[in-house]
Image: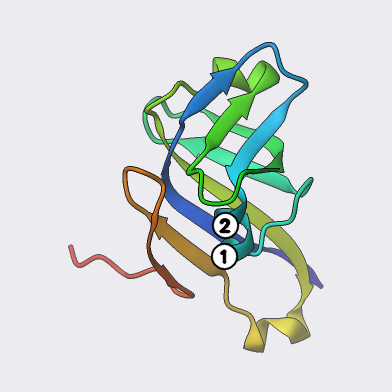
Amino acid sequence: MQLTMLKAKLHQARVTHSELEYEGSCAIDGVLLDTAGIREYEQIQIYNVANGERFTTYAIRAEEGSGVISVNGAAAHKASPGDRVIICAYGVLEEAELADFHPTLVYLDAENRIKRTGHQIPVQAA
């Protein structure tokens, strides 16, 4: 059986640009892509914390260290500069691969700088 698993997450990224008149995609600071293990042109899901929108696009590389998170094309209707978003990439794994699998989680501050990384989502006490 194949399972679709969370591969990588950029948590609490801030949208820096929203470019409607662009071919499409989401430009992401190259350092963030490399740290998360998200490849250029890879399909990503974006979850907008500000308005609840969820949409699919693909990643393109923005300048390393720029902090850019630019939502482009039709997706620009779903996110505005300043919105907090969660950007996720998924992978398909065989059950046998799951024992050694852990996602790469990258937690960001308000300027899209890396605060910390991890491989397990912390459980919040009720």
Image quadrant holding the N terminus, namely: bottom right
Contact, mark 2 vs mark 1 (Cβ under 8 Å): yes
Drawn side of residue 49 relative to residue 59, left or right: left
Q: What residue type is labelled 1?
A: Thr
Q: Which of marks 2 and 1 is in front?
A: 2
Q: Position of residue 8 (x, y in %)?
A: 59, 61
Is residue 42 shown above or below 72? Answer: below
Q: Position of residue 92 (x, y in %)?
A: 77, 65
Image quadrant of residue 21?
top right
Drawn side of residue 91 relative to residue 111, left or right: right
Residue at 46% across, 30% down: 16
Residue 14 versus residue 111: which sits nearer the camera?
A: 111
Q: Name the residue under label 1.
A: 35
Within-10-Å neighbours for mark 1: few <14, some 14–19, many 20+: some
Q: Which numbered circle lies on residue 86?
A: none
Residue at 33% across, 50% down: 109
Q: For numbered disc 2, what is the local secondary structure?
A: helix
Q: Where is residue 49 in the image (x, y as percent from the top left)?
A: 39, 35
Drawn side of residue 107 relative to residue 77, left or right: left
Q: Mark 2 points at which residue?
A: 31
Q: For numbered disc 1, what is the local secondary structure?
A: helix
Residue 46 versus residue 2: which sits nearer the camera?
A: 46
Residue at 44% across, 74% down: 120
Q: How far apart are marks 2 and 1 (CA)?
A: 6 Å
Within-10-Å neighbours for mark 2: few <14, some 14–19, many 20+: some
Q: What residue type is labelled 2?
A: Val
Residue 122 versus residue 20: which sits nearer the camera?
A: 20
What sort of colour scheme is used for the picture? Answer: rainbow
Q: Where is residue 86 in the image (x, y as percent from the top left)?
A: 48, 45
Residue lying at the far left in this picture: please name it. 126
Image quadrant holding the C terminus, namely: bottom left
Residue 15 versus residue 85: which sits nearer the camera?
A: 15
